[in-house]
Amino acid sequence: MSVGEEVRTEQGQPQQSLGTAAARNLATTTKSAPQMQEISSRWLLRMLPWVNVQGGTYRVNRRLTYAVGDGRITFVKTGDRVEVIPAELTELPALRSYDDEDVLSELAQRCQQREFAAGTLIASFGSPTDEVYLLAHGRVEKLGTGPYGEDESLGVLADGAYLGEQALLDSDAIWEYTVRAVTACTVLVLPRQEVERVAERAESLSGHLERLRATPSQRTNKYGEKEVDLAAGHSGEPDIPHTFVDYEARPREYELSIAQTVLRIHSRVADLYNQPMNQTEQQLRLTVEALKERQEHELVNNREFGLLHNCEYDQRLQPHDGVPSPDDMDELLCRRRGTKLFLAHPRAISAFGRELNKRGLVPETIEVGGNRIPTWRGVPIFPCNKIPVTDARTTSIIAMRTGESDQGVIGLQQAGIPDEIEPSLSCRFMGINEQAIIKYLVTAYYSAAVLVPDALGVLENVEIGRWR
């Protein structure tokens, strides 16, 4: 504005007082600390018991268990054609520990693709079991006969499951239940005759199957652990059985994972712009928040130690009607003792709430850290936006028993590392480069361990988009 020029308002009237824009140049404003939208409640990090790990590795010793593999078969899809990955056939009990890749490839090629419409009977009770069914896509229900002759559901299976595996070892096997397609299903079928044809030419396969047929099954408890021989209810002086508790020869070891970044701050900013807020402290605070968000994401989704990928197959459930109903949550609860918490995406919690509303149920709430948390059967349901939602609008609900003393799920960290600012989280000065930029290495070490398989359960393929 030139000298003598009169300032006017937007309405064209002469300005009669000092404007706010000019006044801010001479005033000290009240300001907030830098804000960040990415920060979430991070209930998993808050509720998971953390165990200090020395040496960066945590070994989980268990009783000897004869059940191996995760029981989930992986497929590849090209157009409308589905093929099983040959190595994944070793998830079948009859092919576990079999390692001839050429023979497995031939067996994979002999699988026949079939499509079943919703409601179709795939197998009937009492009929001969002469085919193995590999469920590539869809959901099927196992139906049995109840004690009073009525039909009862024995469970729902989804992508990656298999049925009729006893056909490979027992030519006289029959179906002990009925299998019905709940949705349209894509199934790969491996006939026993095709396996026998391959075995006639492949001595390694025929010998493997013969050894399994001739070897008596190991005596195990219902969890697959080597049974401890005991005597009870006897009288007199009978021979008391001898026993010992065997351990796994190669227990699993969890190494601490890592999340890192290099924080860079120009020395001019650190020197001149530290009032009234310290720029270095604010930069570090926001960086740590981002690291913690990534840490929780990894604890849920990492393929090595993440909760979704480390749940045993027999602890994975499918909702009977797609939506997360109270019946499904009860089924998830009854699979383990002492469930401490549920983790669910906020949209899954909303979907469960709609199902409760349909039945006229009102969930109780409890106060945790000043927040009202919904519960089911007294177990809190914590929101966790790190649990993925697929394009098909499905997600998962996690149930956990936690704590080292309770053989549950635990978080792993190593406190006391150099330049630590929080347990297992450090900020190390890396120097100043030629451009006068100060660098700090910010590092977080963490992992999670499932001490026994039934400590963790997952309700998979939960629909969240159904509103009726």
Image (cartoon, grey):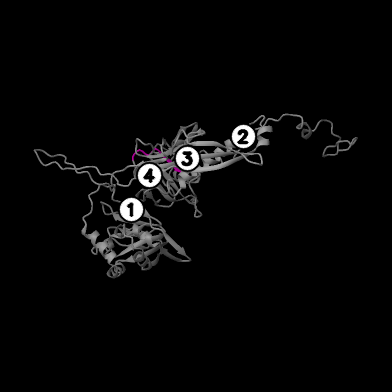
For mark 2, what is the residue?
280
Residue 424 location (% of width, % of height): 47, 36
Name the residue type under label 1: Ser
Of labels 1 and 3, the one closer to you: 3
CA gap between label 3 and label 4 equals 16 Å
CA gap between label 1 and label 3 equals 44 Å
Question: Quick one: label 1 or label 3, which is nearer the N terminus?
Answer: 1
Residue 160 location (% of width, % of height): 39, 57
For mark 4, what is the residue?
253
Residue at x 46%, y 48% (from the top left corner): 302
For mark 1, what is the residue?
153
Question: Can you see residue 311?
Answer: yes
Name the residue type under label 2: Thr
Image: magenta residue range: 337-344
Question: Can you see residue 357?
Answer: no
Of labels 1 and 4, the one closer to you: 4
